[in-house]
Each structure stands twice: as structure tokens, then as C-alpha cells.
Image (cartoon, coloured by chain):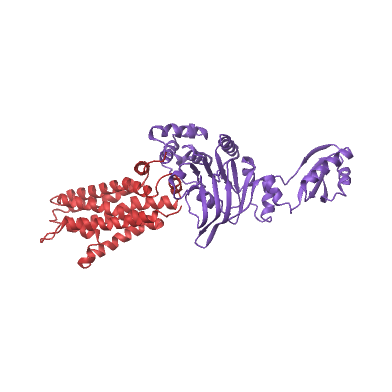
Amino acid sequence: MTPTAAGAVGTIAAITLRRLLRGRTLWVAGVIALVPVAFGAVLRSVGPQGDLADELLTFQMLVLAVLPPMFIASSIGEEIEDRTITYLWSRPIPRWAVVVGKLLALAPPSVALVVVSWHLGCSLGLEAVPPLRSHLALAGAAAVVSAIATGIAVLVPRHGMALTIGYMLLDFWLGIMPASIQNLSVLHHVLAISFPPPEGSDVLTAAIWMAVVGGGWLGAGLWRIRGLEA
Amino acid sequence: MTVVAALGCSKWYGHVLGVSDVTWRLRGGIVGLLGPNGAGKSTLMKMMAGLLRPSRGSLTVFGGSPFDDVAVRRRIGYAPEHEKTWDELSALELVIAMARLAGVPAGRAREAAEAAIAQVGMTDAMHRRVRGFSKGMRQRTKLATAIAHDPDLLLFDEPLTGVDPVARIDIVERIRALGARGKTIVVSSHVLYEIEALTSEIVVIYRGQVLAEGNIYEIRKLIDRHPHRIRIECDRPRAVAAALATSEHVSRLVFERGGLLLETRDPDRCYDEIAAAVLASGVTVSELGSPDNNLGAVFDYLTGGGGRP
């Protein structure tokens, strides 16, 4: 009997999560996630600062650019580079099940850390907690960056984490480009959803663009992995 | 039944040749894949395990492509050469996960994993994390991951590398026991005596090509252009030498301490003549054998003496 694809994904996700809980990555990520919280605490200590949510969100973007690649790109990259992938691909499972299993295991902690970090940072440093939509925007963005990290890590396993962080820095730059290019920027859409301009923003369109960018990278990774050898 | 069939199978890594035009059939039993480091053993193993796809030609396992067909991979157990594994897990967790991924139902995975761990003698350490394991324990754990789903074909890539002598003997015995249970096993090694301890069926691979295959004695026939050495330990070597001196099958005679070493290009007839000479001269033979009946000599012959590790 060969395992079902869903069974294989579930098993790989369970192993990945167990390894995450026993490894150091989660602790390091926790420390990084505390940086915006610390920034919020500093804001609080120097007194009321008015509406600095935009600034705090920009700070949060750095966390968003680092945490998902740290979890996912490094996990996939190490698996391929250390050749432990040979254990998985010699089993009767589809190759894509490995990356999907890892994505399903590692995206939720990334999302949770990004959102909790944002909430705590705002609670400590701002007079009013930002709207729920900013939390949702960041959660969606963390999921999308996780998908981007997955795709990049499959395409370039050795440097997946560094390249994803580099890509997210480029994403900042894309966000200040003319409108048509802005659409490729995940961070631009997070800002647009979180703090819409007075004339309003189309949340659905922003969400679709984010999904397209994340799906594109993930699709490229899944396409590549079909023929990848170990 | 053919288990593995390679037909004109080649594999390149960019411009580097891994395996070149290999045509080979494996029908069962324990087979040793022998060759120096970089000969192409691991490449061939990985192609059999479905990790690599041939660049040219074909390689099938149980009639299907192991790279593309998950049902074929279900029947394969592979223990890779490298030591790295998921150190955060215990041996039992690792083997259970591998069994589940090989298709063992969740309800039976633990039982299958414990049985596999017991087979490799790791029961006492199965709850310990792999991080703290010695090389020998890691090798055994790898073997357990390969056998937990009861596959028909086992591929062990350098399973004795870095293992201490006591553990080596134990692992050899356990692999032989698996073979005795009817499993088809391919074991690779660059160490001649390791393979010799496991099986007499070998495939010699060198620079990506299969130089010879079969029983060590059959391989010896392939290389009969090289002189075969026979050593006779006896009480009166000169008497035996005198009886054999005129034989057309003996090309060289050398006296050694306590005996006689001769070279021949026709071992079968030469052994007959030795028997006749010993009987005729009435000497007492304490030992008769060939230093060439080991893989080291065969490997030296086949690789022109340059490939012996």
C-alpha cells in the first residue's frame, strides 16, 4: 500500500513541527519577533507619540521579511543541501508532498509570531490598537511570504533564506514604484489594507495580488521539484 | 525474476560522468557493489532508489521506473551513504515516520518500527534522540528506516563506513539474515573485505562502468589473462616443484617460507596437476589455497592495480 498524498503531507508536517519545537529556530524567531515589541515599549516609555502606527508597521515589515524565510526557506534548503531529502524522496510519495508538508507546518508559526508581535508592539507603543484589518493583512502577508520562501528555497536551496530576505527588501522598493509595478509588492498591499488612504482601497484586489505573487513563487517551486534529483 | 534491469544506463552531473553505459541485471540474493570512492556506486544506488533519473538509457526496478512510479518505490528500502538525519527525533520516531511515509498504516507503524529496530539491535536506544548516537548506531538506525516497511529490495549504500569492528560484524550478520529471509539486497562498499564478508556475488564498478559481475570465481575466469597464484604449504616444497617444473600450465614457481607459490593461467588444470604431483611425491600438504581468491586481488586485476583503495 502506498500512502495517500494527504497522508504523506500530514506525516511530513508532523515531523517538521516536532523538529521545530525541539530545535533552536523557534527560539531565535521568538527573539526577532520581540524586536517590534521592544520598539513599542520604547515608544511607551518616552510618552504618548500620537499615531505612529505607520512607523511601527514599517518596522514590523522587517520581521515579516525575516521570519517566514527563516522558518521555511532554511528548512527546505537544509533538507536538500544536507541530503536528508533522500530519506523522503526514496519513499513512495510525490515529491511536492515534502514542500507542501513543510509549508503547512511552518507557515502557521510564522503567521502567529508576526501577528502577535504586531499586536503586542501596538498595545505597548500606541495610544490605540490598530484595526483588526491590519492584523489580517499581516497574517495574509506572512502566509504569502511563506509561499514565496518555499518557491525560492526549492529553486535555490543553498541560498534560499538569504535570497528570500533579499527579495523582500526588493519588495519594499517595488512598493514605491508606479502603480502597475506596486501591485507586485506584498508590503505595499499590507499597507494599503492596514491603513487605507482617504479615497479608500480595494481590499479584495490587494488580497488577490498578494495571492498571485505568493502562488506564482509557490507554483514555480512545485513545478521545479517534480524533476529535482537528490 | 529480474529485480533491477539497467540497459545502457548513463548518468551525468553536468560534465561529470557518474555512471557510463551500464547494462546489468539483478535477479535476487545479496549482491555487493564494489568500487573505489567516486566509481559511481552511489549514483547507481540512487538511480535504483528513484532519487536520480538516468541521463541516457533506462533503469527499471520490478519492471517500472523508480523515479516516476511511487508503487515501485514502495517495494524499495534505501539507506543512504551520508550520516545526516533528523537529529531532533528519537530513533523510534524517525523509523515510525519513515514507515508511515512508506505506506505502513498509522495503526501498524509503531509495531513495524519497533520490529525493525529490534532487527538491527537498537531496542535499548530507540527512545534516545539520534543526535547523541555513535556512527554505528546511526548506521543501524538507517538500516531500520530502510527495512521497517518490509520492502522486497534493500539498498544499503556503504552501510559499514565508520563502524567499529564489533558493530561491523554484527551489521554484517544482520544483513546476511535479511538475505536469508529472501530479500534482494544490494550493498555498496569501497572496502573489499566488507563485501567479501557479506557475499560472493559482486559487481565491480570503476569509473562509472561495470567491469565485471557474478560470483567471484566467475569473475576470476574473466580475468584469466592475468596469472592466478596458488600457494602450497608442505613439508618438501622442492619435491612438489620438481614434479610441476615441466608442466605447461605453470608459468612461474617461487619458493616461500614453508611452501611454494606458483602462477598459472589455467587454474583448473593446474589444481589437477598439483594433486597428481603431491600424490606422486608423497609430500604432506598442510595448506593449499590461492591468495587471489579474495576481492582485493580481483579488484587489482580488473583495475590494472590502480584502483585498490
Q: What is chain A's hue in the picture?
A: red
Left/right placement of residue A26 relative to residue B125 reads left
Asked if residue B63 shows in the view, the reply is: yes
**Could you say which quadrant of the image residue B285 lies in?**
top right
Q: How many marks?
A: 0
Q: Quadrant of the N terminus of chain A?
A: top left
Asked if residue A45 shows in the view, the reply is: no
Left/right placement of residue B191 relative to residue A134 reads right
Q: What is chain B's hue in the picture?
A: purple
Residue B241: x and y in percent read 86, 46
Left/right placement of residue B75 relative to residue A5 reads right
In the foreground, B6 or B104: B6
The residue shown at (78%, 49%) is B266
Residue A172: x and y in percent read 25, 62
The residue shown at (24%, 58%) is A186
In the foreground, A45 or A129: A129
Residue A170: x and y in percent read 29, 63
Q: Residue furthest left?
A: A198
On screen, residue B121 above or below A188:
above
Residue A177: x and y in percent read 23, 67
